Amino acid sequence: MTKASLHLLKGVGYLISTASVILLAIVSWSSASESALLTACLIGGAAFSIVGMFCRWLTYQIEKHRSGE
């Protein structure tokens, strides 16, 4: 595999992970919506997870740019 295809695969992996977080949040919403604390935790947890994956993806893009690919 080339470096470019590895970076693409990483990006696709992060998109899949983001989609899974969103799907799990949707499934959990009916229970969490009964409590303000649970709702805040669900939204915060999903947001932190997605932002974390975005940060990791962004570091790969910066490394790719710096290496001149």
Image (cartoon, helix red, strand yellow):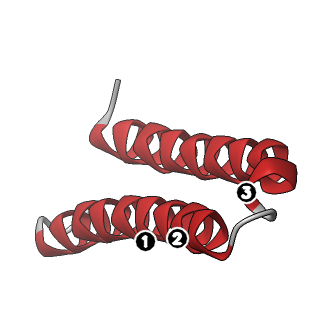
- Dot 2: element: helix
Q: Amino acid at mark 2?
A: Ala
Left or right: 10 as drawn, with respect to 38 = left
Query: In the displayed structure, would residue 9 be above or below residue 19?
Result: above
Residue placed under numbered mark 2 in the picture: 47
Which quadrant does the N terminus fall into? top left
Left or right: 19 as drawn, with respect to 1 = right
* Res 68 → quadrant: bottom left
Q: Residue at x 36, y 37 (%)?
A: 6
Q: Which tag, 2 or 3, sits closer to the chain's start?
A: 3
Q: Residue at x 66, y 69 (%)?
A: 39
CA separation in Å, label 3 and label 1: 21 Å
Residue 6 vs residue 50, the one in the foreground: 50
Residue 58 vs residue 7, the one in the foreground: 58
Q: Position of residue 55 (x, y in %)?
A: 31, 70
* Res 56 → quadrant: bottom left
